[in-house]
Amino acid sequence: MNYLTYIPIWEKLNQLQQDMLMDSAVIRRFRKGEILHNGADDCTGLILVVSGQLRAFTISDEGREITMYRLFERDICLFSASCMMNSIQFDITIMAEKDTEVLVISSEVYKSIMEVSPILANYTNEIMASRFSDVMWLVDQVMWKSFDRRLADFLLSEANIEGTNILHITQEAIGNHLGSPREVVTRMLKYFVSEGLVRLSRGVVEIIDEDGLSKWNKTKR
């Protein structure tokens, strides 16, 4: 199967451009927890998710992680090929959250086509704008939203992604997503337990009052 057809503007490229991209693209498979791309100096290439789930995050000087965005089936990541964009240096790490299959497209080939194809250039700009919107949303959350509301929002989002209210995730992993120490996560989860919103067991957070958690996310400060 030609997974490049996942790119919305694929049919608008000419045959030569399609052939160049197809010849440069390779399928790679990663186990849960494996790193696909590590920092601005690592020019992996453009990553198109065929199946699975990826997490893009940044790491502070103190070693604290915070999730920038997630990537799901048919999503494409440009920051893994930031070397083709001279004005953008984005120090980001990409890790497989589940066993994942991706199509890696050569940065050099993609850039050479983008320079002569307004269609591909416009599509690339749209993706870039969408990712920067994700980053700005995150900045807004961190600056203006209290941690309890961010945690409630995260738990509800995870339940939606996984399709279940029983979340197999450690408190350390939650802290990595939210850029907060595990101890802070632990204290707030225990408070949610006292409020009857969640139930905790080893490596598991179970949402037992989804409506209550949703109201908390919307009304608490």
Image: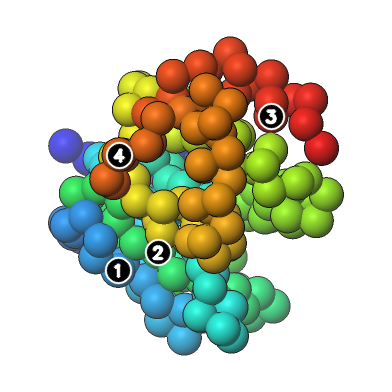
Circle 1 packing at 10 Å, graded few (<14), some (14-19), many (20+), is some
Spatial CA distance of label 1 from label 4 is 28 Å
Residue nearest the viewer, comparing 61 with 171: 171
Question: Picture quarter containing residue 93?
Answer: bottom left
The location of residue 41, given as percent across then percent down, is: 47, 86
Q: Which mark is residue 201?
A: 4
Q: Quadrant of the N terminus?
A: top left
Mark nearest the camera among 3 and 2 is 3
Mark nearest the camera among 2 and 4 is 4
Spatial CA distance of label 1 from label 2 is 6 Å
Spatial CA distance of label 2 from label 4 is 28 Å
The location of residue 209, given as percent across then percent down, is: 51, 17
- Residue under label 2, please give it: 94
What amino acid does circle 2 point to? Ile
Contact, mark 1 vs mark 2 (Cβ under 8 Å): yes
What amino acid does circle 4 point to? Ser
Contact, mark 3 vs mark 4 (Cβ under 8 Å): no
Circle 3 packing at 10 Å, graded few (<14), some (14-19), many (20+), is many
- Residue under label 3, please give it: 217
Q: Residue at x 19, y 49 (%)?
A: 99
Q: Which mark is residue 35?
A: 1
Mark nearest the camera among 3 and 4 is 4
Spatial CA distance of label 3 from label 4 is 22 Å
The location of residue 8, given as percent across then percent down, is: 47, 34
With respect to residue 200, does 36 lie above or below? below
Dot 2 falls on a residue whose secondary structure is strand
With respect to residue 156, does 75 lie above or below? below
What amino acid does circle 3 point to? Asn
Q: Earlier in the sequence, mark 2 or mark 4?
A: 2
Q: Quadrant of the C terminus?
A: top right
